[in-house]
Amino acid sequence: MSSVTIHHAPIPRMKAEDRRELVLTAAMEVFGDNGYVGTTTDMIARAAGVSQPYIVRLFGTKEKLFLDVMQRALDRLIEAFDKALPGDPETVGRRLGLAYVELLNDRGLHLSLMHAFVSGNDPVIGKAARDGFIGVYKYLREFGGFSGPETETFLAHGMLINTMVGLRMTEVYGADPVAKELLDCTFGEKLDVAMKLREARA
Amino acid sequence: MSSVTIHHAPIPRMKAEDRRELVLTAAMEVFGDNGYVGTTTDMIARAAGVSQPYIVRLFGTKEKLFLDVMQRALDRLIEAFDKALPGDPETVGRRLGLAYVELLNDRGLHLSLMHAFVSGNDPVIGKAARDGFIGVYKYLREFGGFSGPETETFLAHGMLINTMVGLRMTEVYGADPVAKELLDCTFGEKLDVAMKLREARA
DNA sequence: GTCTATATGCGGATAGAC
DNA sequence: GTCTATCCGCATATAGAC
């Protein structure tokens, strides 16, 4: 209003909304790598290129930030499924499975969810995680055209994929023949997608 | 040697070996509930009825204690599979699956493993967890008579079971019809075993 | 919108007594 | 074999400046 003074941009400013997006992306990866408790707000701050107190300022608490990350992950998951849904009903499972593995491009997505899924003991995160998982189940039943047992099998394979990702099993694919066989069976035709991402990471 | 003086047992003493067992049992449950990072040596100490520094004295570091817990969990798993193996080859999967669910009696076993499985990023725990998982895979292939894909399917369902346990999904079985359906599909004929344990806990 | 400085509480590990 | 006392580092959150 009063002054239009332009100072030589010592600090990169942006709209809070954009900054939030940027932080959420960074947080999803860091939480994925280190878990909820194992992640410090300072790690996230450095990954996002801002100060630690500013992370707290933006999200209130670390817990709220984690809940936001989880919700974002779930939203992206459903969004990806929505896109993969149209087509031959016979092969919908295959399409959704492929979409799931391609989501590995969103770094930390699977693992942030997985960390939430083992936090059922936490009253706040646990409830949110249960609700989120149940939401995915309902989605597959209602929109995926899956029966209960079909949904269970789909989710089971998803959880094994998550476990392989959590174990960083792809990093020993070449070194251990048993790991190779296990990964071949787990990912099947989706293996190259999973492995390509690993390379891009290095 | 010199004195045979008996003082009126102010502190319950036991052989280090026995104490270790006791602490490992307590630690498996606490680690299962709170994860590796989320667990403090003091929580374990109180659960085991000893002092916090003594936990460190016994195991060196918290990390070594966790590794011991993980190894113990894996040993018990294989031991349970060994017992369930003999019988009709047609139904070996069913027997192993049941044995797996009955292992919920060893509190924290599944969840301590699951926490290890999402810690692949940690150089020490990650390597041990990968080796452990690969060991289970090899066991099923060699002694369970499973093919690669059969093993993958068995493990996948195991991971979904772990996820349900991690989410404490059984605790909302009665309250949420979708949760009920999900749990029915996940545990199938093993549901009553899983639910009975939950009751015993309360 | 973003930072620096800092208060405060907690956790792993060590020292050393009994 | 087991404890008490304690050091030190770290992490979340607050206060307040720019």
Image: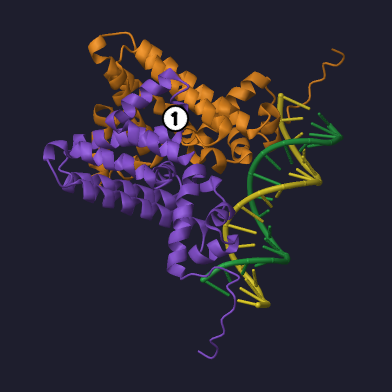
Chain colours: A orange, B purple, C yellow, D green
Indicate the amino acid at tag 1: Met
User: To which quarter of the image does residue A195 belong?
Assistant: top left
Give the residue drawn at x 41%, y 42%: B114
> Is B66 above or below relative to A37?
below
As helix, strand or loop, the secondary structure at mark 1 comes to helix
User: Badge 1 local density, few (<14 within 10 Å), some, or many (20+)?
Assistant: many
Relative side of D15 to A111, left or right: right
Above or below, comparing residue B181 to residue B161 in the picture: above
Q: Which sits in the foreground, B31 or B63?
A: B31
Q: Percent position (x, y) of residue B72?
A: 37, 55
The image shows residue C18 at horizontal and vertical percentages of: 65, 77
Q: Nearer the viewer, residue A109 or B183?
A: B183
Residue lying at the far bottom of the rendered structure: B2
Residue A188 in picture, x, y percent from top left: 24, 30
The residue under the point 46% across, 41% down is B201
Question: Which residue is at 49% across, 38% downward?
Answer: B202
**Viewer can see residue A200:** no
> In the rendered view, does A190 fall on the left or right side of A75?
left
Question: What is the chain letter for disc 1?
Answer: B
Residue C15 spot, x, y in % from top left: 65, 73
Can residue B156 be spotted in the picture? yes
User: Which residue in the rendered view is the most extreme toward the front?
Assistant: B8
The residue pinned by badge 1 equals B169
Q: Classify residue B39 as left or right of residue B67.
A: right
Q: How many marks?
A: 1
Question: Does D10 sit above or below residue A90?
Answer: below
Residue A150 falls in which quadrant of the image? Answer: top left
